[in-house]
Amino acid sequence: MEPENIALEELKLVQAIINTQEQIRLKIMGWGVATVSAISVAYLSEKLDLPSNSYLALSLVIIGIFLWLDTVHRVAVDRAIERSGEIEECLRKEATYDGPKIGKSISVKNGIPYQLRSLKNVRVYGPYLALCFAVLFIYVFNP
């Protein structure tokens, strides 16, 4: 196979990885929203005998856990997007193709520095921040 064809095949695989990881992230976000919503509904309906400070702490801990899970998967997305850009440069003849390198580019250790860098993206933390505001609203204005 010619390098250009290999690059196209790698690009298709990388795009599939991005799509899969984004779907996982959406599920994680959905589970987080559903969990916090269930706790909030139970708290507001007084079916959950929980002091308001405990409600706030429990909700924020759950939001933090789901945010961290989302961020872990975002690191893989970021790496796949970066590799996709490299392949596209090669296809535009701006660089020499050096692949396939899917495993090498995506399987790098997923450490805290990578997670913090991914966490700077508003698409990652924005929904969780909105969820925090909703919890704080319930906490402050619950009769």
Image (spheres, grey):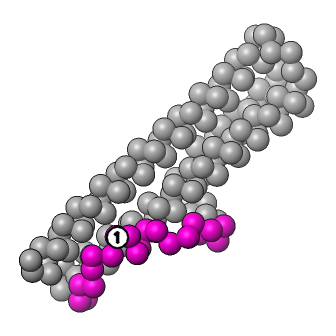
Question: Vertically, is 129 above or below 90?
Answer: above
Residue tagged 1: 102
105 magenta-colored: yes
Question: Vertically, is 29 above or below 68?
Answer: above
Question: Vertically, is 92 above or below 25?
Answer: below
Residue 10: image quadrant is: bottom left
From the top left corner, tell me how far across and down residue 21 is, in percent.
Answer: 42, 52
Question: Vertically, is 12 above or below 96?
Answer: above
Q: Quadrant of the N terminus?
A: bottom left
Label 1 packing within 10 angstroms: few (<14), some (14-19), many (20+): some
Tell me where the magenta segment starts and ends, as one range: 94-114
Residue 2: image quadrant is: bottom left
Residue at (45% x, 45% y) in the render: 24
- Quick check: 114 left or right of 14? right
- Choose between 20 and 55: the one closer to the eye: 20
From the top left corner, tell me how far across and down residue 57 is, in percent.
Answer: 83, 37
Residue 80: image quadrant is: bottom left
* Visible residue check, residue 94: no
Residue at (90% x, 23% y) in the render: 51
42 magenta-colored: no
Q: Quadrant of the C terminus?
A: top right
From the top left corner, tell me how far across and down residue 67 is, in percent.
Answer: 63, 48
* Visible residue check, residue 112: yes
From the top left corner, tell me how far across and down residue 13 is, in percent.
Answer: 26, 61
Does the magenta stretch mainly form a helix, a strand or a loop? loop
Residue lying furthest left in this view?
Answer: 1
Residue at (78% x, 10% y) in the render: 47
Query: Amino acid type of disc 1?
Result: Ile
